[in-house]
Image (spheres, rainbow, N blue to C red):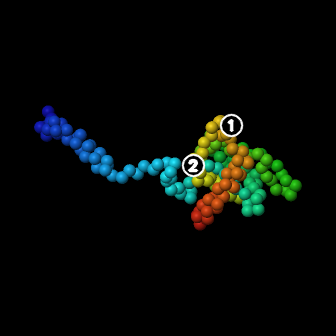
């Protein structure tokens, strides 16, 4: 047998009124939803977005074709082919990243000895055709050139922790 108080609570819909009171309390509060294209949430300097390849200030690409990023990538999204130049240094002939495979873990960025491959703050990108999912060396270098000032600023903030 249920006590009389349980019947009275059920009759007067106490649980429903408590729920309505909670809803009413939050109904008058200001909304915290951001209107996405116009408003952006702040991003940390450690945010991991779209990949990019960097260049030295003289314009030469930084990648020395050590292939550490290819080895450390858990998703096997990076493919590198290289050749040796006449001066004895290696450079990449093919550097491709399959963006469908990439899990944005940042291991490639951490393993790079010359700070060549980086993850930018860019989080809004898309591919309209499946052939656009593989980014080649030229696209990655263009991305790095486009966002170099932001990348350098993020690196300066992170310098004491690296």
Residue 130 percent location from the top left of the image: 65, 36
For image coordinates 64% across by 60% down, the residue present is 149
Secondary structure beneath label 1: helix
Q: Give me the C-alpha separation between circle 1 and circle 2.
A: 20 Å
For image coordinates 66% across by 58% down, the residue present is 148
- State left or right for residue 68 relative to residue 89: left
Residue 161 percent location from the top left of the image: 58, 64
Secondary structure beneath label 2: loop
Q: Determine the residue located farthest toward the front in the rendered image.
A: 38
Image height of 73 relative to 86, above or below? above
Q: Which residue is mark 2?
A: 123
Residue placed most toward the observer, 87 or 150 = 150
For image coordinates 28% across by 47% down, the residue present is 24
- State left or right for residue 79 relative to residue 87: left
Residue 74 percent location from the top left of the image: 63, 44
Q: Classify the position of the N terminus by image quarter.
A: top left
- How many marks on residues? 2
Of callouts 1 and 2, the N-terminal one:
2
Q: Determine the residue located farthest toward the bottom in the rendered image.
A: 160
- State left or right for residue 30 relative to residue 59: left
Dot label at residue 131: 1
């Amino acid at each position: 047998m249920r006590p009389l108080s349980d019947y009275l609570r059920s009759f007067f819909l106490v649980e429903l009124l408590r729920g309505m009171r909670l809803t009413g309390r939050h109904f008058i509060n200001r909304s915290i939803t951001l209107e996405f294209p116009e408003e952006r949430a702040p991003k940390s300097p450690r945010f991991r977005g779209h990949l990019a390849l960097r260049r030295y200030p003289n314009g030469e690409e930084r990648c020395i074709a050590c292939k550490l990023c290819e080895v450390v990538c858990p998703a096997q999204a990076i493919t590198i082919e290289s050749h040796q130049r006449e001066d004895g240094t290696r450079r990449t002939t093919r550097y491709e990243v399959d963006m469908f495979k990439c899990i944005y873990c940042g291991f490639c960025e951490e393993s790079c000895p010359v700070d060549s491959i980086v993850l930018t703050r860019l989080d809004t990108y898309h591919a309209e055709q499946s052939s656009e999912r593989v980014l080649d060396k030229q696209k990655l270098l263009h991305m790095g050139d486009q966002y170099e000032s932001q990348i350098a600023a993020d690196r300066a903030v992170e310098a004491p922790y690296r």
